[in-house]
Image (cartoon, rainbow, N blue to C red):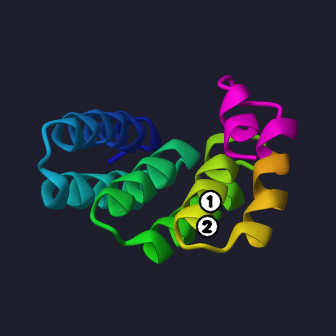
Amino acid sequence: MTQEERFQKAVELLQEAYRLQMEGELDAAIERYQQSIALHPTAEAHTFLGWTYSFQGRLEDAIVQCKEAIAVDADFGNPYNDIGSYLIKLGRLDEAIPWLESAIKAPRYEPRHYPHCNL
């Protein structure tokens, strides 16, 4: 498979995973996200995988995926906010603050009001 074919297949799997996630098929969504990441890791795929884990109450796994997303693309703001949100849910408020502040500063982050709401 060429690099372009791998990328296209990864995009298809990512889209399918998101659809499954929105339909509540979380285990199937996780599998597709993992397949997408194996072909072509993206910050978005890691972040959405983390989000899916969070729906299952697997917040520590969600945080791991968000950190993977940041390793792939440190400019993508969503995983910073998500980590902050997960830490709040875990009652680790002081740990959440720097993550939320990083989300606000991230160059590639559109819903900038989310971290402010969490702070």
Image coordinates of residue 70 in percent, x first then y, are: 69, 56
Provide the secondary structure element on which disc 1 rests.
helix
Provide the secondary structure element on which disc 2 rests.
helix
Q: Is residue 110 visible?
A: yes
Q: Is residue 54 above or below residue 3?
A: below
Residue of label 1: 83
Q: Which residue lies at the image location 84% right of the left edge and 59% below the top edge?
A: 98
Q: Which residue lies at the image location 35% right of the left edge and 63% below the top edge?
A: 53
First to last magenta residue range:
103-119
Residue of label 2: 87
Q: Which residue lies at the image location 47% right of the left edge and 65% below the top edge?
A: 62
Left or right, 66 with reference to 118: left
Assess disc 1: are there few (<14), some (14-19) or many (≥20) residues with their C-alpha within 10 Å of its C-alpha: many
Image coordinates of residue 39 in percent, x first then y, are: 39, 54
How many numbered discs? 2
| Image-quadrant location for residue 21 | top left
- The answer to whether marks 2 and 1 mark residues whose Cβ atoms lie closer than 8 Å is yes
